[in-house]
Image: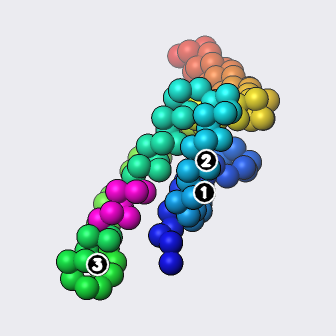
Amino acid sequence: MASQKQMEVVTKGTGFRRRPKTITYTPGTCELLRVMMKESKLTNIQQRHIMDIMKRDLEKEKQRLQNIFATGKDMEERKRKAPPARQKAPAPELDRFEELVKEIQERKEFLADMEALGQGKQYRGIILAEISQKLREMEDIDHRRSEELRKGLATT
């Protein structure tokens, strides 16, 4: 049976980050992907990213085969369970304005990731609309805070 290879793929979605799905490819399919990459007009960064993923998976497969030859059986990597997180005192509640700043940063990072993968055009309009909506909400918060500050200064 031919060895299988896994490769990360980007899933289409609503703009929120998700864990990438893994797909299993045979070595012949991987070679076909290499040829297709050379023929396509991917940037060097995109090609390098794909090749890095393929190399990492190849290294994992080599390690697995070494374990099989050494022990005579397939030893799956057993991951230790993380110790239960200690409950700390609740963190101070984040201000909605700060939450919006973080959300905008996440959207920008997502758009940059998609542009690096050549899918920026597909997501740019959606992400920019979400960012402008959040900016409007930030302006409203700023306006309300300014009014409250003016009223507070007027009464003193």
Question: In the image, what residue occupies the spot 33% across and 63% down?
Answer: 62
> Residue lying furthest bottom in this view?
73
Q: Which residue is mark 1?
A: 29
Question: In the image, what residue occupies the spot 63% across and 30% down?
Answer: 42
The kind of secondary structure element at disc 1 is helix
Q: Nearer the viewer, residue 114 or 60?
A: 60
Q: Nearer the viewer, residue 84 or 12?
A: 12
User: Is 90 included in the stretch rendered in magenta?
Assistant: no
Question: In the image, what residue occupies the spot 62% across and 50% down?
Answer: 32
Question: In the image, what residue occupies the spot 61% across and 34% down?
Answer: 38
Q: Nearer the viewer, residue 147 or 96?
A: 96
Q: Which residue is mark 3?
A: 68
Residue 154 shows in this picture: yes
Disc 1 from disc 3: Cα separation: 24 Å
Q: Would residue 111 be found to the left or right of residue 51 on screen?
A: right
Is most of the magenta stretch helix, strand or loop? helix
Mark sitting earlier along the chain (2/3):
2
Q: Nearer the viewer, residue 32 or 135?
A: 32
The kind of secondary structure element at disc 3 is helix
Badge 2 amino acid: Leu
Percent across and percent down for residue 132 are 74, 26
Q: Quadrant of residue 75?
A: bottom left
Q: Would residue 67 be found to the left or right of residue 104 on screen?
A: left
Badge 3 amino acid: Ile
Q: Is residue 111 above or below residue 151?
A: below
Percent across and percent down for residue 26 are 56, 64
Q: Which residue is mark 2?
A: 33
User: How dense is the environment of label 3, judged by Cα within 10 Å: few (below 14), some, or many (20 and up)?
Assistant: some
Query: Is the residue under label 2 in contact with that under label 1 (CB below 8 Å)?
Result: yes
Q: Which residues are magenta?
A: 57-63
Q: Would residue 56 be found to the left or right of residue 95 on screen?
A: left
User: How dense is the environment of label 1, judged by Cα within 10 Å: few (below 14), some, or many (20 and up)?
Assistant: few
